[in-house]
Every structure is written in C-alpha cells, then in structure tokens.
Amino acid sequence: MQRQRVIIRTIGVAAAVALAATACGPQKTESAGSSSAAPSTPTAGATPEASPTADDKPGEPSPSASASASASASASPSPSVKQIMANGDESEQVRELQARLKQLKLMTVAPTGFYGSKTTAAVKSFQSKHGLDATGGVDEKTWKKIQNSSKKPTADELRPPTVNEVAAPDPRCMTGRVMCISKESRTLAWMIDGKVVSTMDVRFGSENTPTREGVFNVGWKAKEWTSTIYHTPMPYAMFFSGGQAVHYSADFAARGYAGASHGCVNVRDKGKLSKLFDDVQVGDKVVVYW
C-alpha cells in the first residue's frame, strides 16, 4: 500500500487508477518464525503454513516445525530409488495419491494436487506400516502398494464440492448469473437463476487491505495476468471492483489460510476456476457478503 501511495503521488490519480486494476498479490503473514509469506522463497525456521511445500487446510492442526523439517528431509529421494512423486510436486497423480491416502484414513483433508508436508507424513506412515523404506516420497513399489490397498478414486473423491461448507446464498444471489461469495464460509458459489452450479474455497484480503463487500459486475477478464504493483501471477482473473478480482492463487493452494490477498478473492482449485472462467461472462453479477 505504501508503494501504491508513492505511485499515486508520483504519476497522478489517473495513472494510479489504471495500475490499481492489477493490484492483487499474496500478503505477508505475521506468524511466528516466518519472515516472509512469499511462496517461492521459504525462510529458515518457517512454519509449515508459510512453506511452499505445506498442503495444510483450514480446520486442521498444524504439525510442529520439527516435524515439517523431518518430513521435508525424508522426502529427499534415495540415489538408488527412482521417485515417482515427492515433496514439492503438483499434478493430477498427486491428487489421486491424496484421495487414496484419505481412503486409507491416513489423510483427513481434501485432495489439493500439491504434495506438501501432510502428504509426506501420510506416505511415510503408510510405508512404515507396510514394511517399506519410510522416505516420505513415492517410488514405484510404494505406489503399487498404495494402489493395491485402495480403490480408484471417484470424481467426488478427487474434487469434493468444497472443503468449506457452503453458506446459504445471499438473497441478492437468487436471480440471474452470479458469483455468490461468502466471507463467513469462505466459499464461492457460481449460481444461475438461484441454482448452485459449482462451489469452491476462497480467501480474502487482510484487515489492512480488505476485500470489498457489496454487489458488483464482472468488468473484464484475463486468462493470464500479472499484477503491475505486486508482480505476482493472477491466472483466470475476473475483475469486479477496481483492482479486485477473483483469480487463482498458487500461494493459497500451497499455504491455505496462513496467508491473505491484497483484496482479491483467491481460489485454490485451478481446475474448477478454469471451468468457471469459461462460464462467466463480462457483466455477470458478483455478490460479496458476510
């Protein structure tokens, strides 16, 4: 915000308004032991929530820093064993792995497709129980054992409607085409004529840079966009109020609610948002409410 004020004083109100259209980006957190919230530059002593390899979800207790360090270390592939999946990977195969581990009661959170500290710990637990080398990474032997011990995940198991329970729609969401966004439940419901078509988890701006509440309209869309102020990627951006937009956030996908945006509505499920981006039209309504 300080930088934005400098820009406004330097180049004038008109230019500042233009720049504000791309003003979103992940914010730093105040959590102990973490000096930066940037997902690409973890710092020494960072908590799992502040680490780009943490797949923590809301409502789950955070593992200790020492446990996270141990999990990260154990994920290092052995020189003699080829790893199929390991800490830091992100893919549909990782999503399937997580769904299978959830079937086996080794994970309690919904699949994210991101291989972080919780996935590492779950794999390590499985390996220990089945007499495998407890590396925390998945080699061919571990993967085959997990497949034989579980069933092929269903579509709902791979992508649950949402991790958070969707709130009752605001009355203003009941007509037309609406992105109905609840700050209380931290969910976005895409609704058409009062019917919910799809739902997804979202997060908002911090106390200092809050996401605006009210009724808006999608002003413009950009499949690929980068903030000109914070220089962070904003894929599948749908701008609804100045520089505030609904967009995918890799930071949210990696760290969950340990971070915040600079006012945008962050979505962590890229696949769901990609479909929503195709469905939403310029002019569609956006309702943000408590």
Image (spheres, rainbow, N blue to C red):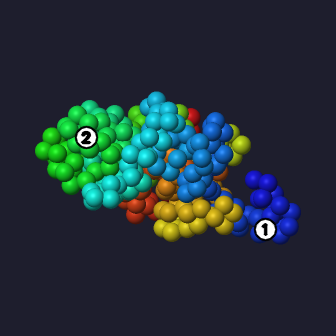
Instruction: Tell me the element at label 2.
Output: helix
Q: Which residue is mark 1?
A: 14
**In the picture shown, does residue 96 fall above or below 279?**
above
Q: Residues within 10 Å of mark 1 (few under 14, many from 20)?
A: few
Residue 231 falls left or right of residue 273? right
The disc labelled 2 sits on which kind of residue?
Gln
Vertical comparison of 193 with 20: above or below: above
User: Residue at the location (71% across, 43% down)?
Assistant: 208
Horizontal and vertical percent position of residue 85 = 31, 55
In the current view of this chain or complex, which residue is farthest to the right?
9
Residue kind at label 1, given as amino acid type: Ala
Residue at position x 60%, y 47% in the image: 44
Residue 162 appears anywhere in the view: no
Query: Alpha carbon of mark 1 to alpha carbon of mark 2: how far?
Result: 60 Å
Q: Which residue is mark 2?
A: 127
Q: Are marks 1 and 2 in contact (CB under 8 Å)?
A: no
Q: Is residue 12 visible?
A: yes
Query: How far from the left and from the top, in percent, is residue 3?
Result: 78, 59
Q: Secondary structure at mark 1?
A: helix
| Residue 198 vertical placement versus 223 (above, below) | above
- Asked whether, in this view, residue 84 is left or right of residue 74, the answer is left
The percent coordinates of residue 155 (x first, y second) are 24, 48
Residue 225: x and y, percent?
Answer: 55, 67
Indicate the quadrant where residue 151 lies. Answer: top left
In the foreground, 102 or 223: 102
